[in-house]
Image: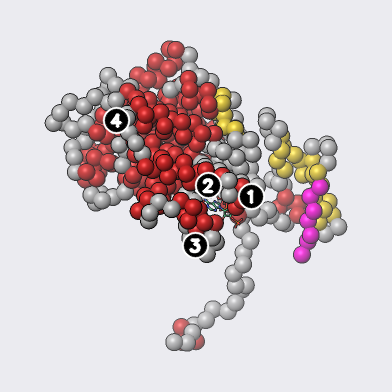
Protein backbone atom coordinates (compact mmCIF):
# COMPACT_ATOMS: atom_id res chain seq x y z
CA UNK A 1 0.00 0.00 0.00
CA UNK A 2 1.11 3.53 -0.63
CA UNK A 3 2.84 5.44 2.14
CA UNK A 4 1.81 9.09 2.00
CA UNK A 5 3.78 11.88 3.66
CA UNK A 6 2.49 15.44 3.34
CA UNK A 7 5.10 18.18 3.69
CA UNK A 8 4.32 21.90 3.86
CA UNK A 9 5.97 24.44 1.60
CA UNK A 10 5.99 28.25 1.76
CA UNK A 11 4.23 28.70 -1.63
CA UNK A 12 0.80 27.89 -0.35
CA UNK A 13 0.88 24.20 -1.28
CA UNK A 14 1.82 20.95 0.41
CA UNK A 15 3.40 18.09 -1.46
CA UNK A 16 1.98 14.64 -0.86
CA UNK A 17 4.60 11.96 -1.57
CA UNK A 18 3.14 8.53 -2.36
CA UNK A 19 4.39 5.47 -4.27
CA UNK A 20 7.35 7.48 -5.55
CA UNK A 21 5.03 10.16 -6.96
CA UNK A 22 4.22 13.63 -5.72
CA UNK A 23 0.96 15.58 -5.68
CA UNK A 24 0.86 19.27 -4.95
CA UNK A 25 -2.16 20.19 -2.81
CA UNK A 26 -3.17 23.86 -2.50
CA UNK A 27 -3.43 25.48 0.91
CA UNK A 28 -6.46 27.57 1.85
CA UNK A 29 -6.11 30.32 4.41
CA UNK A 30 -8.90 31.83 6.50
CA UNK A 31 -9.13 35.42 7.70
CA UNK A 32 -7.84 34.44 11.16
CA UNK A 33 -4.83 32.63 9.71
CA UNK A 34 -6.25 29.09 9.87
CA UNK A 35 -4.74 26.92 7.14
CA UNK A 36 -6.44 24.02 5.41
CA UNK A 37 -5.16 21.56 2.82
CA UNK A 38 -7.50 21.42 -0.16
CA UNK A 39 -7.86 17.70 -0.92
CA UNK A 40 -10.69 18.07 -3.45
CA UNK A 41 -8.50 16.51 -6.21
CA UNK A 42 -6.98 13.82 -3.99
CA UNK A 43 -9.06 10.82 -5.04
CA UNK A 44 -9.13 11.82 -8.68
CA UNK A 45 -5.37 12.10 -8.84
CA UNK A 46 -4.25 9.33 -6.44
CA UNK A 47 -7.18 6.96 -5.90
CA UNK A 48 -6.82 7.56 -2.15
CA UNK A 49 -9.17 9.27 0.27
CA UNK A 50 -8.66 10.90 3.68
CA UNK A 51 -9.76 9.09 6.85
CA UNK A 52 -10.96 11.25 9.73
CA UNK A 53 -13.67 9.68 11.95
CA UNK A 54 -15.55 12.41 13.82
CA UNK A 55 -14.17 14.97 11.29
CA UNK A 56 -11.82 16.49 13.91
CA UNK A 57 -9.34 17.47 11.17
CA UNK A 58 -11.76 18.13 8.35
CA UNK A 59 -12.99 21.53 7.20
CA UNK A 60 -16.34 20.92 5.53
CA UNK A 61 -16.90 24.48 4.23
CA UNK A 62 -15.74 28.08 4.16
CA UNK A 63 -17.82 30.12 6.59
CA UNK A 64 -17.89 33.79 7.56
CA UNK A 65 -20.32 33.40 10.46
CA UNK A 66 -18.58 32.27 13.65
CA UNK A 67 -14.95 32.16 14.68
CA UNK A 68 -13.71 29.95 17.52
CA UNK A 69 -10.16 29.68 18.79
CA UNK A 70 -10.50 26.74 21.14
CA UNK A 71 -6.91 26.97 22.36
CA UNK A 72 -7.38 30.57 23.49
CA UNK A 73 -11.04 30.32 24.53
CA UNK A 74 -12.28 32.84 21.92
CA UNK A 75 -15.76 32.92 20.38
CA UNK A 76 -16.96 35.62 17.98
CA UNK A 77 -20.12 35.95 15.89
CA UNK A 78 -19.42 37.86 12.65
CA UNK A 79 -16.30 39.28 14.30
CA UNK A 80 -17.98 40.49 17.50
CA UNK A 81 -16.67 38.94 20.76
CA UNK A 82 -19.31 36.88 22.57
CA UNK A 83 -18.57 38.85 25.75
CA UNK A 84 -19.64 42.13 24.04
CA UNK A 85 -22.75 40.63 22.51
CA UNK A 86 -23.73 39.06 25.84
CA UNK A 87 -23.30 42.36 27.66
CA UNK A 88 -24.75 44.77 25.09
CA UNK A 89 -27.04 43.02 22.61
CA UNK A 90 -30.39 41.26 22.53
CA UNK A 91 -31.15 37.85 21.08
CA UNK A 92 -33.13 39.30 18.17
CA UNK A 93 -30.22 41.60 17.27
CA UNK A 94 -27.82 38.66 17.44
CA UNK A 95 -30.16 36.55 15.30
CA UNK A 96 -30.19 39.30 12.66
CA UNK A 97 -26.41 39.66 12.90
CA UNK A 98 -25.84 35.94 12.32
CA UNK A 99 -28.28 35.73 9.42
CA UNK A 100 -27.43 39.03 7.68
CA UNK A 101 -23.78 39.53 8.63
CA UNK A 102 -24.16 42.99 10.24
CA UNK A 103 -25.81 44.31 13.37
CA UNK A 104 -29.26 45.65 12.40
CA UNK A 105 -29.87 49.37 12.00
CA UNK A 106 -32.78 50.71 14.11
CA UNK A 107 -35.50 50.38 11.41
CA UNK A 108 -34.24 46.92 10.41
CA UNK A 109 -34.43 45.72 13.99
CA UNK A 110 -37.90 47.21 14.45
CA UNK A 111 -39.14 45.49 11.27
CA UNK A 112 -37.62 42.18 12.36
CA UNK A 113 -39.16 42.54 15.83
CA UNK A 114 -42.59 43.21 14.31
CA UNK A 115 -42.31 40.35 11.82
CA UNK A 116 -41.22 37.84 14.45
CA UNK A 117 -43.98 39.07 16.78
CA UNK A 118 -46.79 38.93 14.23
CA UNK A 119 -45.91 35.42 13.02
CA UNK A 120 -45.73 33.82 16.45
CA UNK A 121 -49.13 32.11 16.37
CA UNK A 122 -49.27 28.63 14.93
CA UNK A 123 -52.13 27.31 12.81
CA UNK A 124 -55.03 26.06 14.98
CA UNK A 125 -54.66 22.60 13.43
CA UNK A 126 -51.26 22.45 15.09
CA UNK A 127 -52.94 22.00 18.48
CA UNK A 128 -54.46 18.75 17.25
CA UNK A 129 -51.05 17.72 15.90
CA UNK A 130 -49.67 17.90 19.47
CA UNK A 131 -52.56 15.79 20.78
CA UNK A 132 -51.18 12.81 18.86
CA UNK A 133 -48.11 12.52 21.08
CA UNK A 134 -48.07 10.54 24.33
CA UNK A 135 -48.30 12.74 27.46
CA UNK A 136 -44.82 11.72 28.62
CA UNK A 137 -43.23 12.49 25.23
CA UNK A 138 -39.87 14.23 25.57
CA UNK A 139 -40.33 17.77 24.19
CA UNK A 140 -37.27 17.51 21.89
CA UNK A 141 -38.67 14.92 19.45
CA UNK A 142 -42.01 16.75 19.70
CA UNK A 143 -40.26 19.98 18.62
CA UNK A 144 -38.38 18.19 15.85
CA UNK A 145 -41.63 16.70 14.56
CA UNK A 146 -43.46 20.04 14.83
CA UNK A 147 -40.76 21.95 12.95
CA UNK A 148 -40.70 19.26 10.24
CA UNK A 149 -44.49 19.55 10.07
CA UNK A 150 -44.28 23.31 9.42
CA UNK A 151 -43.11 22.32 5.94
CA UNK A 152 -46.58 20.91 5.33
CA UNK A 153 -48.21 24.27 6.14
CA UNK A 154 -45.80 26.37 4.06
CA UNK A 155 -45.18 24.66 0.75
CA UNK A 156 -44.30 27.61 -1.47
CA UNK A 157 -41.54 27.02 -4.03
CA UNK A 158 -38.15 28.24 -2.85
CA UNK A 159 -37.51 31.90 -3.70
CA UNK A 160 -35.63 34.63 -1.85
CA UNK A 161 -38.98 35.87 -0.47
CA UNK A 162 -40.22 32.44 0.60
CA UNK A 163 -36.89 31.73 2.35
CA UNK A 164 -37.22 35.07 4.17
CA UNK A 165 -40.77 34.11 5.19
CA UNK A 166 -39.58 30.71 6.46
CA UNK A 167 -36.82 32.37 8.49
CA UNK A 168 -39.30 34.76 10.11
CA UNK A 169 -41.81 31.98 10.74
CA UNK A 170 -39.21 29.74 12.35
CA UNK A 171 -37.85 32.42 14.68
CA UNK A 172 -41.37 33.61 15.50
CA UNK A 173 -42.98 30.21 16.03
CA UNK A 174 -40.19 28.29 17.75
CA UNK A 175 -40.98 29.70 21.24
CA UNK A 176 -44.66 28.87 20.64
CA UNK A 177 -43.83 25.32 19.56
CA UNK A 178 -41.41 24.87 22.48
CA UNK A 179 -43.99 26.12 25.01
CA UNK A 180 -46.74 23.98 23.42
CA UNK A 181 -44.58 20.89 23.72
CA UNK A 182 -44.20 21.65 27.44
CA UNK A 183 -47.88 22.45 28.01
CA UNK A 184 -48.80 19.21 26.28
CA UNK A 185 -46.64 17.23 28.74
CA UNK A 186 -48.48 18.93 31.65
CA UNK A 187 -51.93 18.48 30.15
CA UNK A 188 -52.47 22.25 30.43
CA UNK A 189 -54.15 24.42 27.78
CA UNK A 190 -51.89 26.07 25.24
CA UNK A 191 -51.37 29.79 25.83
CA UNK A 192 -51.51 32.04 22.79
CA UNK A 193 -48.57 34.41 22.26
CA UNK A 194 -49.03 38.01 23.42
CA UNK A 195 -47.85 40.59 20.92
CA UNK A 196 -47.26 43.27 23.57
CA UNK A 197 -44.45 41.23 25.11
CA UNK A 198 -40.81 41.02 24.07
CA UNK A 199 -39.46 37.73 22.66
CA UNK A 200 -38.33 36.17 25.94
CA UNK A 201 -41.14 37.50 28.17
CA UNK A 202 -43.60 36.10 25.64
CA UNK A 203 -41.87 32.72 25.81
CA UNK A 204 -42.06 32.71 29.64
CA UNK A 205 -45.73 33.71 29.39
CA UNK A 206 -46.54 30.82 27.03
CA UNK A 207 -44.59 28.41 29.29
CA UNK A 208 -45.90 29.42 32.70
CA UNK A 209 -49.19 31.32 32.33
CA UNK A 210 -52.56 29.58 32.56
CA UNK A 211 -55.92 30.99 31.48
CA UNK A 212 -56.99 31.01 35.17
CA UNK A 213 -54.89 33.86 36.51
CA UNK A 214 -52.72 36.83 35.60
CA UNK A 215 -49.08 36.09 34.84
CA UNK A 216 -46.36 38.69 34.58
CA UNK A 217 -42.96 37.49 33.37
CA UNK A 218 -40.16 38.54 35.72
CA UNK A 219 -37.87 40.91 33.76
CA UNK A 220 -34.77 39.52 35.50
CA UNK A 221 -35.68 36.04 34.33
CA UNK A 222 -36.59 37.22 30.82
CA UNK A 223 -33.20 38.93 30.55
CA UNK A 224 -31.45 35.76 31.74
CA UNK A 225 -33.27 33.75 29.04
CA UNK A 226 -32.21 36.33 26.45
CA UNK A 227 -28.57 35.95 27.57
CA UNK A 228 -28.78 32.16 27.39
CA UNK A 229 -30.17 32.33 23.86
CA UNK A 230 -27.38 34.70 22.75
CA UNK A 231 -24.71 32.38 24.16
CA UNK A 232 -26.14 29.41 22.29
CA UNK A 233 -26.89 31.20 19.01
CA UNK A 234 -24.10 29.69 16.90
CA UNK A 235 -21.02 27.55 17.30
CA UNK A 236 -19.75 26.92 13.77
CA UNK A 237 -19.60 23.37 12.40
CA UNK A 238 -20.75 21.34 15.43
CA UNK A 239 -22.78 18.12 15.17
CA UNK A 240 -26.24 19.69 14.80
CA UNK A 241 -25.11 22.52 12.51
CA UNK A 242 -23.26 20.10 10.27
CA UNK A 243 -26.44 18.01 10.22
CA UNK A 244 -28.46 21.04 9.08
CA UNK A 245 -25.91 21.69 6.31
CA UNK A 246 -25.72 18.04 5.27
CA UNK A 247 -29.49 17.69 5.05
CA UNK A 248 -29.82 21.08 3.30
CA UNK A 249 -27.13 20.10 0.80
CA UNK A 250 -29.63 17.65 -0.72
CA UNK A 251 -31.85 20.75 -1.35
CA UNK A 252 -34.19 19.70 1.46
CA UNK A 253 -36.07 22.80 2.61
CA UNK A 254 -35.23 24.92 5.65
CA UNK A 255 -37.89 23.36 7.93
CA UNK A 256 -36.76 19.81 7.14
CA UNK A 257 -33.09 20.73 7.62
CA UNK A 258 -33.74 22.44 10.98
CA UNK A 259 -35.85 19.49 12.17
CA UNK A 260 -32.84 17.23 11.53
CA UNK A 261 -30.61 19.64 13.46
CA UNK A 262 -32.97 19.47 16.45
CA UNK A 263 -32.70 15.67 16.44
CA UNK A 264 -28.90 15.85 16.37
CA UNK A 265 -28.88 18.37 19.22
CA UNK A 266 -30.93 16.03 21.42
CA UNK A 267 -28.03 13.61 21.98
CA UNK A 268 -26.41 13.51 25.45
CA UNK A 269 -22.94 14.25 24.04
CA UNK A 270 -24.27 17.43 22.42
CA UNK A 271 -27.22 19.56 23.58
CA UNK A 272 -28.49 16.88 25.94
CA UNK A 273 -25.45 17.34 28.18
CA UNK A 274 -27.02 20.08 30.33
CA UNK A 275 -29.77 17.70 31.42
CA UNK A 276 -27.06 15.13 32.23
CA UNK A 277 -25.16 17.74 34.27
CA UNK A 278 -28.15 18.34 36.53
CA UNK A 279 -28.72 14.58 36.89
CA UNK A 280 -25.03 14.18 37.74
CA UNK A 281 -25.12 16.98 40.35
CA UNK A 282 -28.29 15.50 41.90
CA UNK A 283 -26.76 12.02 42.05
CA UNK A 284 -23.61 13.39 43.72
CA UNK A 285 -25.85 15.09 46.29
CA UNK A 286 -27.96 11.93 46.77
CA UNK A 287 -24.82 9.87 47.34
CA UNK A 288 -23.63 12.13 50.15
CA UNK A 289 -22.00 14.99 48.22
CA UNK A 290 -18.55 13.40 47.85
CA UNK A 291 -17.29 15.49 44.95
CA UNK A 292 -13.73 14.14 45.01
CA UNK A 293 -15.00 10.53 44.72
CA UNK A 294 -17.05 11.48 41.65
CA UNK A 295 -14.09 13.17 39.99
CA UNK A 296 -12.06 9.98 40.59
CA UNK A 297 -14.80 7.90 38.96
CA UNK A 298 -14.89 10.27 35.95
CA UNK A 299 -11.17 9.60 35.42
CA UNK A 300 -11.54 5.83 35.68
CA UNK A 301 -11.78 4.38 32.14
CA UNK A 302 -13.52 1.26 33.52
CA UNK A 303 -16.28 3.43 34.95
CA UNK A 304 -18.74 4.81 32.38
CA UNK A 305 -19.22 8.12 34.24
CA UNK A 306 -17.75 11.17 32.55
CA UNK A 307 -17.74 14.55 34.15
CA UNK A 308 -20.71 15.89 32.19
CA UNK A 309 -20.37 19.52 31.13
CA UNK A 310 -16.61 19.11 30.94
CA UNK A 311 -14.55 18.78 27.80
CA UNK A 312 -15.16 19.96 24.29
CA UNK A 313 -14.04 18.90 20.84
CA UNK A 314 -12.85 22.42 20.05
CA UNK A 315 -12.21 24.23 23.36
CA UNK A 316 -8.98 23.18 24.98
CA UNK A 317 -9.37 26.12 27.34
CA UNK A 318 -12.24 27.53 29.42
CA UNK A 319 -15.33 27.80 27.21
CA UNK A 320 -16.00 31.60 27.18
CA UNK A 321 -19.74 30.93 27.34
CA UNK A 322 -19.29 28.93 30.56
CA UNK A 323 -17.40 31.86 32.11
CA UNK A 324 -20.28 34.27 31.29
CA UNK A 325 -22.88 31.80 32.53
CA UNK A 326 -21.09 31.10 35.79
CA UNK A 327 -21.38 34.80 36.71
CA UNK A 328 -24.93 35.05 35.37
CA UNK A 329 -25.94 32.04 37.53
CA UNK A 330 -24.65 33.73 40.66
CA UNK A 331 -26.34 37.04 39.70
CA UNK A 332 -29.76 35.51 38.96
CA UNK A 333 -29.72 33.43 42.14
CA UNK A 334 -28.72 36.48 44.18
CA UNK A 335 -31.34 38.74 42.57
CA UNK A 336 -34.05 36.18 43.23
CA UNK A 337 -32.77 35.42 46.76
CA UNK A 338 -32.36 31.75 45.84
CA UNK A 339 -29.78 29.27 47.09
CA UNK A 340 -28.65 26.45 44.82
CA UNK A 341 -27.07 23.32 46.21
CA UNK A 342 -26.39 22.36 42.58
CA UNK A 343 -24.34 25.53 42.02
CA UNK A 344 -22.34 24.82 45.21
CA UNK A 345 -21.56 21.27 44.06
CA UNK A 346 -20.77 22.45 40.52
CA UNK A 347 -18.28 25.02 41.79
CA UNK A 348 -16.61 22.42 44.02
CA UNK A 349 -16.45 19.99 41.10
CA UNK A 350 -14.92 22.65 38.89
CA UNK A 351 -12.31 23.59 41.50
CA UNK A 352 -11.26 19.97 42.03
CA UNK A 353 -11.24 19.08 38.34
CA UNK A 354 -9.28 22.16 37.30
CA UNK A 355 -6.50 21.32 39.75
CA UNK A 356 -6.44 17.63 38.88
CA UNK A 357 -3.63 16.28 36.67
CA UNK A 358 -6.02 14.18 34.54
CA UNK A 359 -8.22 17.14 33.62
CA UNK A 360 -5.24 19.46 33.17
CA UNK A 361 -3.35 17.06 30.92
CA UNK A 362 -6.47 16.24 28.87
CA UNK A 363 -7.28 19.98 28.62
CA UNK A 364 -10.78 19.42 29.95
CA UNK A 365 -12.57 22.59 31.09
CA UNK A 366 -16.20 23.41 31.84
CA UNK A 367 -18.26 23.85 28.67
CA UNK A 368 -21.45 25.90 28.21
CA UNK A 369 -23.58 23.06 29.54
CA UNK A 370 -21.86 22.93 32.92
CA UNK A 371 -23.68 26.02 34.20
CA UNK A 372 -26.62 26.40 31.81
CA UNK A 373 -28.68 23.68 33.54
CA UNK A 374 -28.29 25.37 36.91
CA UNK A 375 -29.53 28.68 35.58
CA UNK A 376 -32.44 26.98 33.77
CA UNK A 377 -33.41 25.34 37.08
CA UNK A 378 -33.32 28.74 38.79
CA UNK A 379 -35.59 30.11 36.04
CA UNK A 380 -38.09 27.33 36.73
CA UNK A 381 -37.47 25.58 33.38
CA UNK A 382 -38.03 21.83 33.80
CA UNK A 383 -35.08 19.54 33.13
CA UNK A 384 -36.59 17.90 30.05
CA UNK A 385 -36.94 21.36 28.46
CA UNK A 386 -33.24 22.24 28.79
CA UNK A 387 -32.33 20.99 25.34
CA UNK A 388 -35.36 22.75 23.90
CA UNK A 389 -33.95 26.01 25.32
CA UNK A 390 -30.71 25.23 23.51
CA UNK A 391 -32.75 24.73 20.33
CA UNK A 392 -34.39 28.15 20.71
CA UNK A 393 -30.97 29.72 21.01
CA UNK A 394 -29.25 27.77 18.22
CA UNK A 395 -32.01 28.38 15.67
CA UNK A 396 -30.58 31.59 14.10
CA UNK A 397 -27.15 29.93 13.81
CA UNK A 398 -28.63 26.95 11.96
CA UNK A 399 -30.58 29.30 9.70
CA UNK A 400 -27.51 31.45 8.95
CA UNK A 401 -25.42 28.36 8.18
CA UNK A 402 -28.11 26.88 5.94
CA UNK A 403 -28.43 30.14 3.96
CA UNK A 404 -24.66 30.44 3.67
CA UNK A 405 -24.39 26.84 2.47
CA UNK A 406 -27.11 27.35 -0.15
CA UNK A 407 -25.37 30.45 -1.50
CA UNK A 408 -21.90 28.91 -1.59
CA UNK A 409 -20.87 27.97 -5.16
CA UNK A 410 -18.67 25.19 -3.68
CA UNK A 411 -21.65 23.42 -2.07
CA UNK A 412 -22.22 19.91 -3.38
CA UNK A 413 -24.48 17.26 -1.90
CA UNK A 414 -22.69 15.96 1.23
CA UNK A 415 -21.51 12.48 0.47
CA UNK A 416 -18.50 11.21 2.42
CA UNK A 417 -16.63 8.09 1.38
CA UNK A 418 -15.57 5.13 3.51
CA UNK A 419 -12.86 2.58 3.93
CA UNK A 420 -14.72 -0.67 3.37
CA UNK A 421 -13.71 -3.42 5.83
CA UNK A 422 -16.40 -6.06 5.13
CA UNK A 423 -16.30 -9.36 3.29
CA UNK A 424 -14.84 -9.37 -0.19
CA UNK A 425 -16.89 -10.83 -3.08
CA UNK A 426 -18.15 -14.32 -2.31
CA UNK A 427 -20.59 -16.85 -3.77
CA UNK A 428 -24.24 -16.62 -2.66
CA UNK A 429 -25.04 -19.29 -0.03
CA UNK A 430 -28.41 -21.03 -0.67
CA UNK A 431 -30.66 -21.46 2.45
CA UNK A 432 -30.07 -25.26 2.65
CA UNK A 433 -26.31 -24.69 2.81
CA UNK A 434 -26.40 -22.20 5.73
CA UNK A 435 -26.56 -24.65 8.66
CA UNK A 436 -28.94 -24.52 11.69
N1 LIG B 1 -14.82 13.42 31.73
C1 LIG B 1 -13.77 12.59 31.78
N2 LIG B 1 -12.93 12.34 30.75
C2 LIG B 1 -13.20 12.96 29.59
C3 LIG B 1 -14.27 13.86 29.44
C4 LIG B 1 -15.10 14.07 30.57
N3 LIG B 1 -16.16 14.91 30.48
N4 LIG B 1 -14.29 14.35 28.18
C5 LIG B 1 -13.26 13.79 27.54
N5 LIG B 1 -12.58 12.96 28.39
C6 LIG B 1 -11.37 12.22 28.08
C7 LIG B 1 -11.66 10.98 27.26
O1 LIG B 1 -11.90 9.84 28.09
C8 LIG B 1 -10.40 10.86 26.44
O2 LIG B 1 -9.40 10.34 27.31
P1 LIG B 1 -8.18 9.41 26.74
O3 LIG B 1 -7.55 10.21 25.63
O4 LIG B 1 -7.29 9.24 27.93
O5 LIG B 1 -8.83 8.15 26.27
C9 LIG B 1 -10.03 12.31 26.13
O6 LIG B 1 -10.57 13.06 27.25
C10 LIG B 1 -10.58 12.86 24.85
O7 LIG B 1 -11.98 12.63 24.84
P2 LIG B 1 -12.84 12.39 23.52
O8 LIG B 1 -14.17 11.81 23.90
O9 LIG B 1 -12.01 11.62 22.53
O10 LIG B 1 -13.00 13.87 23.01
P3 LIG B 1 -14.02 14.37 21.94
O11 LIG B 1 -13.49 15.61 21.40
O12 LIG B 1 -14.36 13.27 20.98
O13 LIG B 1 -15.36 14.62 22.81
C11 LIG B 1 -16.94 15.60 24.22
C12 LIG B 1 -15.76 15.84 23.27
C13 LIG B 1 -17.99 14.67 23.56
C14 LIG B 1 -17.66 16.93 24.48
C15 LIG B 1 -16.43 14.97 25.52
O14 LIG B 1 -15.51 15.86 26.15
C16 LIG B 1 -17.55 14.62 26.49
O15 LIG B 1 -18.12 13.51 26.40
N6 LIG B 1 -17.89 15.52 27.47
C17 LIG B 1 -18.98 15.30 28.34
C18 LIG B 1 -20.30 15.58 27.60
C19 LIG B 1 -20.53 17.06 27.41
O16 LIG B 1 -20.36 17.87 28.31
N7 LIG B 1 -20.99 17.41 26.19
C20 LIG B 1 -21.32 18.80 25.85
C21 LIG B 1 -20.39 19.33 24.82
S1 LIG B 1 -20.70 21.03 24.54
C22 LIG B 1 -22.02 21.06 23.52
O17 LIG B 1 -22.30 20.16 22.79
C23 LIG B 1 -22.82 22.21 23.59
Residue 160 position (above or below residue 264)? above
Outermost left residue: 212
Cα separation between marks 2 and 1: 14 Å
Going from N to C along the chain, the mark reached first, 3 or 2, is 3
Going from N to C along the chain, the mark reached first, 4 or 1, is 4
Residue 292 position (above or below residue 105)? below
Q: Quadrant of the N terminus?
A: bottom right
Residue 109 position (above or below residue 406)? above
How far across and how far down the image is residue 162, in percent? 41, 29
Residue 405 sits in quarter: top right
**CB under 8 Å between discs 3 and 2:** no
Residue 258 makes an appearance in the image: no
Cα separation between marks 3 and 2: 19 Å
Outermost right residue: 20
- Disc sitting over residue 303 in the figure: 3
Going from N to C along the chain, the mark reached first, 2 or 1, is 2
Q: Which residue is mark 1?
A: 361
The label nearer to you, 4 versus 2, is: 2
Which residues fall within the magenta stretch?
1-7
Q: Which residue is mark 4?
A: 204
The label nearer to you, 3 versus 4, is: 3
Q: Quadrant of the C terminus?
A: bottom left
How far across and how far down the image is residue 74, in percent? 60, 32
Amino acid sequence: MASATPTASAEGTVALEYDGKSLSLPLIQGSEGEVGIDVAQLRNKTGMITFDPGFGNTGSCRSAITFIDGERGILRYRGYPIEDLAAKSTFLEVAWLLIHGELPAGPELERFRRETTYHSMVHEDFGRFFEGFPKDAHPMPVCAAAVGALATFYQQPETEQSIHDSVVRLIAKMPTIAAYSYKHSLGQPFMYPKNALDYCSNFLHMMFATPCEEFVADPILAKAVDLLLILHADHEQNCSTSTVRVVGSSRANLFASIAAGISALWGPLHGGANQQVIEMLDSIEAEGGDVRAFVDRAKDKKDNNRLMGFGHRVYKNYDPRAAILKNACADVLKAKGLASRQLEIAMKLEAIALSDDYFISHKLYPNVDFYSGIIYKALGIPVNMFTVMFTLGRLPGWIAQWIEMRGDPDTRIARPRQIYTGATARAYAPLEARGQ
